[in-house]
Image (tube, rainbow, N blue to C red):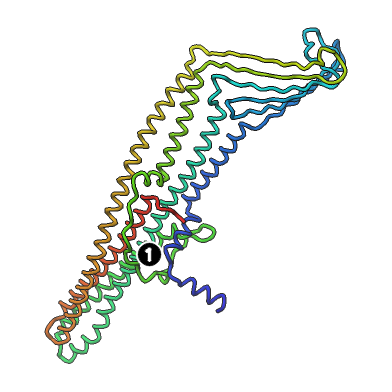
Amino acid sequence: MSGLALAVVLAAAPLTLDEVLVAADRAFPALQAARADADAAEGELLAAQGGFDPVARVRGLSIPLGGYPSTRLDAVVEQPTPLWGAGLFAGYRYGQGAFPVYYGERATNTGGELRAGASVPLLRNGSTDRRRTALGRAEAEAQGQRESVMAQRLEVRRAATARWVDWVAAGRRLAIARAVLGLAQARDAGLAERAAVGDLPPIDRTDNLRAVLQREGAVVAARRQLEHAALELSLYLRDEVGQPVTPAEERLPEGFARPGEASVRPSLEALWAARPDVRRLGLVREQLTLERRLAENQQLPGLDVSLAVTKDFGAGDAKLDKTEVEAGLSFEFPLPNRLARGKARSASGALLRVLEQERLLRDRAAVEVGDAESALGAARERVRLAGRELEVATELERAEWHRFELGEGNLLFVNLREVARAEAAVREVDALADFHKAEAAFRAATAAPLP
């Protein structure tokens, strides 16, 4: 088969729901926007992780002329850690020349001075600090945005399924309208012959012409519905570059699959664990909990201990040859500490608000699943009843045709039976469409796993 022939075959192949879902997942703008938000959150997470990057500082100074000619160099690397807020440092200092008495500590031996140490907060900034809070919030936000992408995927799949179902249903309604029109058109030639030989009153053929015109109008209306459904579907059916693709009528499937086994409703615990919107709000709660914990910690006094070790190398002052250990203690307490107390109160209020929102969201999720399950059960029953109605209407139409051919009936009753069967067929299509929409809504409400 040539490439052109293969392309024609593929173009005319029935448009499956899976094809629509894959296209929507790849290029639907709202989903792409959610993924961009997730990528931005990953960038914020990287920035928050940068709060624990080591920092190197180097400063050099030379005084070639003056009362105290000297040369100095100071280099230090500082490393903040998430371990109880401890900070580590290591550095090198070099100082040679003449220094005033009050700056005598600037002098080092000829090999310079190495130093290292640590500072540990005991109260404020101990159990938590701004760096760790920012990192925790960024991690929760990144995960939350991933949950938002999942929630958007669920909604896009539900909506795309509904639009595909609408398009297929519109195609089936058009096929039914064309079929019932074809019956009236095919019957017209025979009625004309019978009326011409006096075997049938001319008014019967006139009534059939009325039926033809009426059914032609129904075909026009059904075609418009199909065109509208195709345009709506094109929002989700997109090509490789993301442009909408309006499906051709030739790609309509034969119809809908019949209902399968009933879906199982998950437990509330499983539902809350599966719903991305519930998990997303739980992550917001986690962020506010971190903020409140930080605000409460900032109300404590600042009490830090530090330890440093220094050692000079090379020739010079004998006192500098000895290893020096320095221990320090600092205390700080702002009065009346309204900033920290205000932040703690604000964070507590925001956390309480989110807890209530989370409770409402869980209740709403349970209601949504219950309603979706009810709609699915009702749609399944409607499909069964509509199928049975179509069988009865078809049987009545055949019987009426048989009576008409035997001369015991009339054309009016034939038309009525044909219309009744067509309406029954449309109701079956509507019932099947509602079932597949309800099934998609149930899967979205229960956050069924996505491929």
Which residue lies most toward the left here? 408
Residue under label 1: 227
Q: Horizontally, is 28 left or right of 132 in the view?
A: left
Q: Horizontally, is 196 left or right of 15 in the view?
A: left
Q: Residue at x 60, y 17 (%)?
A: 304
Q: Is residue 61 visible?
A: no
Give the amino acid at mark 1.
Glu
> Percent position (x, y) of residue 81?
62, 29
Image quadrant in which you'd find residue 318 = top right
Mark 1 closeness class: few <14, some 14–19, many ≥20 residues within 10 Å = some
Q: Residue at x 38, y 46 (%)?
A: 270
Which residue lies most toward the top here? 101
Q: Residue at x 26, y 64 (%)?
A: 383
Position of 386 relative to 136 (above/below): below
Position of 24 relative to 386 (above/below): above
Who is closer to the viewer here, 165 or 287? 287
> Percent position (x, y) of residue 119?
64, 21
Q: Horizontally, is 28 left or right of 171 in the view?
A: right
Identify the image quadrant of the N terminus. bottom right
Position of 3 relative to 330 (above/below): below
Who is closer to the viewer here, 198 or 406? 406
> Percent position (x, y) of residue 148?
45, 45
Q: Secondary structure at mark 1?
A: helix
Position of 113 relative to 448 (above/below): above
Q: Is residue 192 visible?
A: yes
Who is closer to the viewer here, 285 or 187? 285
Image quadrant in which you'd find residue 207 = bottom left
Q: Residue at x 46, y 49 (%)?
A: 30
> Percent position (x, y) of residue 136?
52, 34
